[in-house]
Amino acid sequence: MRTLFEFIIFPGFLFTAIAGMVFSWIDRKVTARVQWRQGPPFFQPVYDFIKLLGKETIVPSSANSVIFLLSPLLAIASTTLASVILWKAIINPQSLFVGDLLVVIYLLAVTPLAVILGASASGNPIASLAASREMKLYSAYELPFIFSILVSVIKLNTIKLGEIILSQQSSGIIFNSFSGVIAFVVFLLTIQAKLGLVPFDMAEAETEIAGGVFIEYSGVPLAIHKLNRIMLLFIIPVFASVLFFGGKFWSIIVVLVLIILIRNTNPRVRIDQAIKFFWRTCLIFSIFAVVLATIGY
Amino acid sequence: MNEEKKRTVIPIGPYHPLQEEAEFFKLYVEGEKVVDMDIEIGYNHRGIEKLSESLHWDQSAFLVERICGICSTSHPFAYVNAVEDLAGIEIPIRAKYIRSVIGELERIQSHMLWLGLAGHFIGYNTVWMWSWKYRELVNDIFEFITGNRMHYAMMKIGGVRRDIEKKDIPQIEKMCNDLIPAIDLFKGAVTDDPVIHARTKGVGILPKDVAIDYCVVGPTARASGIDIDIRRDDPYSAYNLVDWKVIVTKNGDVFDKVAVRILEMYESIKIIRGCLEGLKKEPEGNFDLNVKEIPAGEGIGRHEAPRGEVYHYVRSDGTNRPVRHKIRAPSYVNVPSDQYAVKGYTVSDAALVLAAVDPCYCCTERVAVIDKEKNKKIMNGFDLIKLSQEKTAKIKNGPKIL
């Protein structure tokens, strides 16, 4: 019963969804103010979600309907579980098992895979092009993403989220070290791709491929996919905060603000440029950070 | 599997977030690479040329103004040039200056609009919003001079419809000076940002010989190194009375097209300043010949619109209507060159290349303000016009520049 409560209400689905909507509203409002616009009202993300729930769900005749409809559920279930693990670690650092960090990394990798599955199953040529972009992007950013997490693991010598938080509280945050700063910058750039935001939103790119991976989605499945993105916008800053700042609340907001700033001051890059960027620049810097962390900087 | 079968068709249009207008670009792709493209246009035929034959000479100027919302003075400009060529009219020098001022202001607002859209197409929405925000300044100048923000209705056979009075000139000069920092901002943003360089340099190259083969005009041609500009090559209005130069670059890629347009905005401001200086020297009042009769004959008129050369041909049989009115608009010439320019680049580049020739949109909106609670109209068209007139009065009393 307790597990069910944790998964569905707090800190699981409901809490993450509500917090995600607040974060999404902050994102949209700040973006609007940067662009000299008024911005949406506070409940706009809720309105958007409810509106999509009321729309007809269309499954294209060319689609594999089981995989097509399973994809949003797969994505949101894994995101919810990741959120539960992260928040349990923050609330009670002693409570979880050794290796929960690895579980979170795996769970965060499910969303891109689910999106690729859903897009490939839709039978639309644009979605297949978008799925290939998402695949390339995922294979490009995942390695620097894991290397930048590795810095925290090496410096604190643990793969338990609770201990990562506790030892940062007692002996100073990772971000204070040289390797920590480099790892954080790489992490920040890779999560931009993980969240599907400019400059790495080429899998959705509405002016090029009209929504890309989500082009055939409508109604409830689209609402769930969008909600999943909104939840990720909340838990990935939380994850960054746990890894580099010891789970302090202010750092979640700082990460969110940095994400918004990056997304508003850059144009979208091409997929080949993104791969080059992640595999050359980001990978080299993250390996450099790992080496620095190993020798103690 | 043979070559043909590997190709996938990625449609851009007829309704697509990239070009919110009915145009259809059929991209044949292999993976991400565009190997060929088909262009289908002609979804929206409005029969303007035929309509023009049923209107008076003066009415046609208003009609052709409605061809395009963004370059709305270019068509009447070319049209009055054509009719004056037909009738052999030499307009007063004051009218020449005023026409050039309107023409150049329009170029600035059109280039700013395009710059914003180009930003939007590569996902840089901040540039989009900022550029359109600064474009409002140009619209304010228009409102100050003509009373309208779009569709200024300034062109008239034999002159212009309104004068720019001497007491207003310092105000207009000040408003133009306020535009310079905005253009500087975009120039800096485009020339300094490495990500914009990565997206635009060497993309969608249209070499000079191909550009000549496709007969492209305007900034699209000038970015490919073709030194053409109707304002200089066939001087009309006040363009040979003031000092300015034609911007030409060599590479023909998207970056050069951006650069040409940004640098042209500086030249436009230079022309406006020159014209305003000229206006100060001319006596007030003589800005319209009040032409009544159009003799039989035929005439052509050209104008360098923001997108390139606009060409109008009119034929008269001595009655009060044209018997034939032929229009050649620049986008119609420029769009086919995309077929060459997108080949070999990726789908991402194609979206930008298609937009780089600045295909022209036309849209008009009607607005009513409605009370949501009572579901009642609280402002109709007349109230909004009144509101607009109050705003014009406010601008006349000293505008608020950001």
Image (tube, coloured by chain):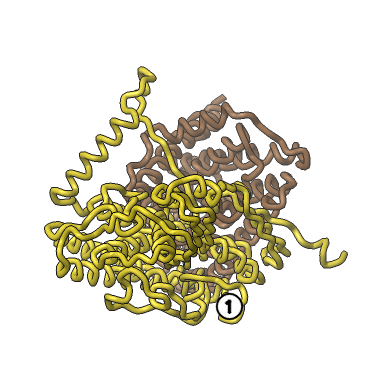
Chain colours: A brown, B yellow
**Res A103 visible:** no
**Res A231 visible:** yes
In the rendered structure, the answer to whether residue B238 lies left or right of residue A296 reads left
Question: At x 62% / y 48%, what residue is drawn?
Answer: B43
Task: From this view, report whether residue B316 is shown above or below residue A39.
Answer: below
Percent position of residue B102, x then y: 31, 60
Task: From this view, report whether residue B53 is shown above or below residue B388.
Answer: below
Q: Read off the residue under disc 1.
A: B212
Task: From this view, report whether residue B396 is shown above or below residue B179.
Answer: above
In the rendered structure, the answer to whether residue A274 lies left or right of residue B66 reads right
Using the image as rendered, state which of residue A278 and residue B203 is in the foreground. B203
What element does badge 1 sit on? helix
Which chain is disc 1 placed on?
Answer: B
Question: At x 43% / y 40%, what residue is drawn?
Answer: B365
Quadrant location, the N terminus of chain B: bottom right
Give the quarter of the image for residue A56.
Answer: top right
Mark 1 residue type: Ile
Using the image as rendered, state which of residue B258 and residue B358 is in the foreground. B358
Question: At x 48% / y 39%, what residue is drawn?
Answer: A88
